[in-house]
Amino acid sequence: MGLLVMIAGLVVFLGVHLAATKRDFRARLISSYGEGPYKVGFSLISAVGVALIVWGFLDYRATGLIDVWHPPRVMKHIAEALILPAIILMVASYIRGRIYAKLKHPLLVGVKLWATAHLLANGDLGSIILFGSILAWAVIDRISLKRRSDPSGLPIPVGGVRNDVIAVIVGLVLYLALGALFHPYVVGVPVFGA
């Protein structure tokens, strides 16, 4: 049951995000409903998708994993190493500095690293579906960004090295908090020393 709920959540969450890559469709929605209601609707639908994903995945994990393959132990260490830059890149998409200017879309790069790390460390069906779907979405979204001809809004100011240092520090703190607190106590899977 949990796996089906998770898949439904992925369809909702990724579906609304993929629909946003169709710029004509997005423009028609904004024209019909206004930008504010569009953003609220997008956010609410995304939140429902995330809730279904989390609930379904936690239920799936609690009722027993369906193993597809057994990753060697070294994959967990590689995953730990990939997650740190992934989180720093995600933070750098909001605290914009040279990292942001160089990569243009550090959030998508971070999501791709994060999903890849989880695919390397987990060989069960639910994880493969979850992280594989998110990785596929990030790749598709990045390709769509390269092909867009419409402006995505007002230019966003980009800072310098100071913002990069802040992004690295915040990313490191988040990495440690997620690995030491969130992952073992919420997800139920220890990260460090496992």
Image (cartoon, rainbow, N blue to C red):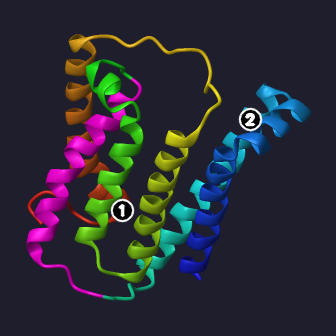
Residue 52 lies, with reference to residue 81, above or below; the image says: below
Residue drawn 35% across and 44% down? 109
Residue 38 lies, with reference to residue 62, above or below; the image says: above
Type of amino acid under label 2: Val
Q: Which residues are magenta?
A: 69-94
Residue drawn 39% across and 88% down? 66
| Mark carried by residue 187 | 1
Q: Quadrant of the C terminus?
A: bottom left
Inspect the magenta stretch and tell me whether residue 84 lies in it. yes
Dot placed on the residue nearer the N-terminal end, 2 or 1: 2
- State which quadrant residue 25 falls in: top right
Label 1 residue SS: helix
User: What residue is shown with label 2?
Assistant: 40
Residue drawn 46% across and 60% down? 134
- Residue 103: give x, y in percent of width and height: 33, 32
Type of amino acid under label 1: Val
Q: Is residue 172 left or right of residue 68?
A: left
Crowdedness near tag 2: few (<14), some (14–19) or many (≥20) residues, C-alpha within 10 Å: few
- State which quadrant residue 10 falls in: bottom right
Name the outermost residue toward the right. 32
